[in-house]
């Protein structure tokens, strides 16, 4: 048998169920490797001792009927975990220990998974490079100068570096798909309403969605199957008949119609991305799918719309971090002084920038011109997709306009940072499911991803398309363990 | 017609224009968006969930019961029920507002225009309702326990409130008094708000402006925030209206502003001007989808609506021939109307109405009790009234029996028996008594017969006296007249 850490999530589960390996062996392997990988700065909080204890408990009384029997998993530090520090990578929550568990993580534990630790991310999930974290930037295992993407950068880095067999992230504008694309991994953002938002530190409520990040498509299907449940604690959770994604996974996509939107060929996009996209079409054709040119005319408005809607919601969602009830507080001479000092010191620059943008666009006199207009444009973007989905079953686009960039390259230029989300953001605005799969390497040898966008609640369809493409692409990418301390 | 409420200065008459924003706490076991209990008077911070305290990742989930209560109230206000309404966030920072925003309804409230009819001395008057919307209450900041710190109690945080906004149709402190009482009565009938002002279940922001009598245009208004008793509302209006008239008479201009009523100094003072008004940055709460329901839902709630004060009043007038005044008194409070209807099940309506609004109200007033706490049950009052009606006791004896009933809600039949208070209505027995009186007062009989007819009262009094007050006065009269011929 190959090395434990080289096994996929599905393989691990299967091996544990067949009693070929124990939960303790698996957990120990990941704990050992994680302990030697501090250079990546992918963990905010490690709970290795408790993980090992739970693994032993599992082995002494194993329940093999669970979908994730005895598998250790590290999760993004945006999910509240009972009695385990949850910071959203912000100073303002740097001492916060929830007394409750998010629904999505609870679903993992209910199905036998074991928490390894909490993974670094951009502060309050605001960023595309994991450079805004209060606990420092995360390094990509691909290269020491490279960002892993963001905001689920710690998740992507840990997954690609094999510090966890799989992980979960959140995606508000691309925060799962973009880092997956940057690190040669698979990332799925489900339809809005598929995974409960209960217990996830909110960034932008109408856009946030949790999803799996895995080494292959099958693992994403399995993890989504566990994560996604109807939850009456979240009023936006949707009660639909959820398929058993991993069981129903199929490579038969013959006759599927795949749309290719011309608006995604943006100015300055590299030839490599263009070629990747062409290759993607050819893979799909090889699988028996039909490629159809489609148009999503309002695509160019997606990014500005997103950067109004998301900050507006964030400015309000983050108002609760005021130093009064929990979290970080700086003393002040009076109430206003306490608020100002607490929030000035507790939030980082990017978070403050977005709170200010959000406050501005909601202000009286500006509301109609910005927020209301953005909501209207959002409706048009949704309509674009609705129209296209009359004709096609799914849409193929690149995941990002470029491969991973260097640490520090864009951190002083917010707009160029924001432009990185150009292909992922429309999917969130329309509330659709989207998956990024690794599809090739650029000249520098960095991974590039392709995105498949589906109709609402048709995750099974995009998983099947991704599954068959994965087979054709046969992406091989070996990361050398350059960062490890012995 | 009662006189219009006008303020006179230098020979000019000013009319006062008032609109109310009433905050009525929804009668509900749990809060608007969480399952925490709402019980009043609990230890601080014992009725607080993670949602109420706005912990990270916590989400509001609408309490359907509160929606029903708001719809019921809307129906009671004869208002338009909106099948689609939207919850918005009203953003501002305050320690007793844990989310940093209040979830409220801004552009699309659950209930639209309606009306309330007031019974005034001058006749009835209809007050327009602008809207009713649902919102969360905030917690309470306590400044006077700790000398250095403000303490926060979040028990109230997230409790459901209905904000009922009237049109500027009120014209005097008295109309405000009647309006609040009517609103409270309707909600008590519906069981949607207990209307308890001491516990803060009913509070109001009062908008006041003045204009010269006969003018069409409204004056600039000031809003007096959060007044929690009818008396204070009336005092605040009076003070504020006079303040505004003084300014206008001195050639000044009213600034639109928010003011506070100082109950100790009996004056309003500026809290913030229009320029300093908060920018609440309202926007639809993305955690809550629009609230939608169909007409069937509203119809099913309509079926649960009880008879309301106005209907009950008409019924009392038509069916029982009560005067509008009497009917109004009996229906204004749900418990009173229940008591009345219980008494008249077995008793004469007119006597019941008299005894409830007379003796019983006086007793409750004296003991400072609600009718629900009445020391005399409806059942026993009904028995007492029947004793009067069938002539067992006189009205006068009934009053003393009533007194005796207050101790432990005693059965009046037992009291009458025990004390031997039955009215003496046997003509033979009465004749004996009367003959005795006549025999003992020969000289008076002579005087009477010689024309001093005033003495008839004397004989009645004497007869009553020897009967120990129990003689049937009507019979005594009849027999005496015969005997003294």
Image (spheres, rainbow, N blue to C red):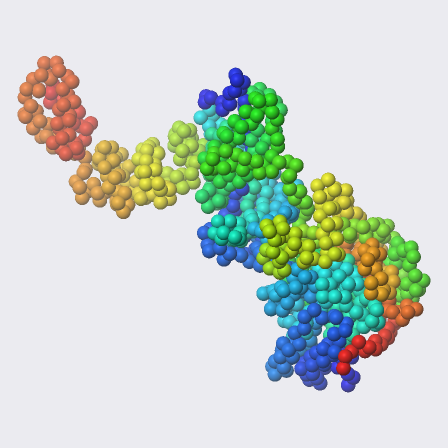
- For image coordinates 72% across by 80% down, the residue present is A32
Asked if one can make out residue A477 in the rendered structure from this viewpoint, the answer is yes
The quadrant holding residue B460 is top left
Q: Position of residue B44 (x, y in %)?
A: 49, 55
The quadrant holding residue B450 is top left
- For image coordinates 81% across by 72% down, the residue present is A141
Asked if one can make out residue B77 in the rendered structure from this viewpoint, the answer is no
Residue that sits furthest to the top in the current view: B451
Q: Is residue B262 above or below residue B150?
A: above
Report the side of A104 relative to B79 (left or right).
Answer: right
Of the pair B340 and B8, the residue shown nearer to us = B8
Q: Position of residue A434 (x, y in %)?
A: 79, 61
Q: Position of residue A464 (x, y in %)?
A: 80, 67
- For image coordinates 46% across by 24% down, the residue present is B122
Of the pair B376 and A34, the residue shown nearer to us = A34
Q: Position of residue A23 (x, y in %)?
A: 67, 81
Q: Is residue A118 above or below residue B167?
A: below
Q: Count every numbered label the image shows and give the total.
A: 0
Report the side of B362 relative to A274 (left or right).
Answer: left
Of the pair A247 and B205, the residue shown nearer to us = B205
Report the side of B213 relative to B3 (left or right).
Answer: right
Residue that sits furthest to the front in the current view: A333
Q: Quadrant of the C terminus of chain B?
A: top left
Q: Is residue A159 above or below residue A332?
A: below
- For image coordinates 47% across by 35% down, the residue present is B265
The quadrant holding residue B479 is top left
């Amino acid at each position: 048998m190959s090395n434990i850490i080289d096994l996929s999530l599905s393989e691990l589960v299967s091996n544990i169920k067949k009693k070929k390996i124990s939960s303790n062996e698996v957990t120990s392997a990941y704990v050992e490797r994680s302990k030697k990988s501090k250079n990546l700065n992918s963990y905010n909080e490690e709970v290795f001792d408790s993980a090992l204890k739970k693994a032993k408990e599992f082995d002494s009384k194993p329940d093999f009927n669970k979908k994730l029997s005895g598998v250790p998993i590290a999760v993004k530090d945006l999910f509240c975990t009972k009695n385990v520090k949850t910071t959203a990578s912000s100073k303002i929550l740097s001492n916060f220990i929830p007394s409750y568990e998010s629904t999505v993580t609870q679903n993992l534990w209910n199905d036998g998974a074991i928490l390894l630790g909490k993974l670094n991310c951009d502060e309050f999930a605001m960023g595309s490079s994991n450079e805004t974290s209060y606990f420092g930037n995360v390094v990509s295992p691909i290269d020491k100068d490279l960002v892993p993407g963001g905001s689920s950068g710690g998740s992507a880095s840990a997954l690609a570096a094999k510090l966890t067999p799989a992980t979960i992230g959140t995606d508000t504008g691309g925060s799962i798909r973009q880092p997956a694309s940057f690190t040669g991994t698979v990332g799925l953002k489900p339809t809005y309403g598929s995974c409960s938002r209960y217990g996830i530190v909110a960034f932008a409520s109408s856009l946030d969605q949790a999803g799996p990040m895995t080494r292959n498509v099958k693992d994403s299907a399995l993890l989504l199957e566990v994560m996604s449940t109807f939850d009456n604690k979240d009023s936006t959770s949707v009660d639909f008949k959820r398929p058993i994604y991993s069981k129903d996974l199929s490579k038969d996509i013959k006759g599927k119609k795949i749309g290719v939107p011309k608006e995604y060929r943006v100015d300055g996009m590299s030839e490599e991305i263009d070629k990747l996209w062409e290759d993607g079409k050819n893979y799909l054709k090889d699988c028996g799918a039909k490629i159809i040119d489609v148009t999503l005319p309002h695509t160019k408005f997606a990014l500005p719309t997103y950067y109004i809607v998301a900050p507006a919601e964030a400015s309000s969602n983050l108002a609760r971090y005021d130093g009064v009830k929990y979290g970080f507080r700086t003393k002040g001479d009076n109430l206003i002084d306490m608020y100002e000092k607490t929030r000035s010191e507790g939030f980082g620059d990017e978070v403050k920038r977005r709170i200010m943008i959000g406050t501005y666009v909601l202000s009286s006199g500006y509301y109609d011109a910005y927020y209301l207009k953005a909501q209207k444009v959002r409706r048009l973007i949704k309509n674009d997709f609705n129209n296209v989905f009359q004709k096609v079953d799914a849409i193929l686009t690149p995941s990002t306009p470029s491969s991973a960039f260097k640490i520090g390259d864009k951190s002083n230029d917010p707009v160029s940072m924001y432009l990185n989300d150009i292909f992922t953001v429309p999917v969130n605005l329309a509330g659709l499911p989207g998956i990024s799969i690794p599809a090739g390497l650029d000249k520098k040898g960095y991974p590039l991803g392709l995105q498949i966008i589906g109709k609402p609640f048709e995750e099974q369809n995009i998983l099947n398309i991704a599954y068959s493409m994965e087979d054709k692409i046969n992406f091989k990418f070996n990361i050398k363990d350059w960062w490890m301390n012995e | 017609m009662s006189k219009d409420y006008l303020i006179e200065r230098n020979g000019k008459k000013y009319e006062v224009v008032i609109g109310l924003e009433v905050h009525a706490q929804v009668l509900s076991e749990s809060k608007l968006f969480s399952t925490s209990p709402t019980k009043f008077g609990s230890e601080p911070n014992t009725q607080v969930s993670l949602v109420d305290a706005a912990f990270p990742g916590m989400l509001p989930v609408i309490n359907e019961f509160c929606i029903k209560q708001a719809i019921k109230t809307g129906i009671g206000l004869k208002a338009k029920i909106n099948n689609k309404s939207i919850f918005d966030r009203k953003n501002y920072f305050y320690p007793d507002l844990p989310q940093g925003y209040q979830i409220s309804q801004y552009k699309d409230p659950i209930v639209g225009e309606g009306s309330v009819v007031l019974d005034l001395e001058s006749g009835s008057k209809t007050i327009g309702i602008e809207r009713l919307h649902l919102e969360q209450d905030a917690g309470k900041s306590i400044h006077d326990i700790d000398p250095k710190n403000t303490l926060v109690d979040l028990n109230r945080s997230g409790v459901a409130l209905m904000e009922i906004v009237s049109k500027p149709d009120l014209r005097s402190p008295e109309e405000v008094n009647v309006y609040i009482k009517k609103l409270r009565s309707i909600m008590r009938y519906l069981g949607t708000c207990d209307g308890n002002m001491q516990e803060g279940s009913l509070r109001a922001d009062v908008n006041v402006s003045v204009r010269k009598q006969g003018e069409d245009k409204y004056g600039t208004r000031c809003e007096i925030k959060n007044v929690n008793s009818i008396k204070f509302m009336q005092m605040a209006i009076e003070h504020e209206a006079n303040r505004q008239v003084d300014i206008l008479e001195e050639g000044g201009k009213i600034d639109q502003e928010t003011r506070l009523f100082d109950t100790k100094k009996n004056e309003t003072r500026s809290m913030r001007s229009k320029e300093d008004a908060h920018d609440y940055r309202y926007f639809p709460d993305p955690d809550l989808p629009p609230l939608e329901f169909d007409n069937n839902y509203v119809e099913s709630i309509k079926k649960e609506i009880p008879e309301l004060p106005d209907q009950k009043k008409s019924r009392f007038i038509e069916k029982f021939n009560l005067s509008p005044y009497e009917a109004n008194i009996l229906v204004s409070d749900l418990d009173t109307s229940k008591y009345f209807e219980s008494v008249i099940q077995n008793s004469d309506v007119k006597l019941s109405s008299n005894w409830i609004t007379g003796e019983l109200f006086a007793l409750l007033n004296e003991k400072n009790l609600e009718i629900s706490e009445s020391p005399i049950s409806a059942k026993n009052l009904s028995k007492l009234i029947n004793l009067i009606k069938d002539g067992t006791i006189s009205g006068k004896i009934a009053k003393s029996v009533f007194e005796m009933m207050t101790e432990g809600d005693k059965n009046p039949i037992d009291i009458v028996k025990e004390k031997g208070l039955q009215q003496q209505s046997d003509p033979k027995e009465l004749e004996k008594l009367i003959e005795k009186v006549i025999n003992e007062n020969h000289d008076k009989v002579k005087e009477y017969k010689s024309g001093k007819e005033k003495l008839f009262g004397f004989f009645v009094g004497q007869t009553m006296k020897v009967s120990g007050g129990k003689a049937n006065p009507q019979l005594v009269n009849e027999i005496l007249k015969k005997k003294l011929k």
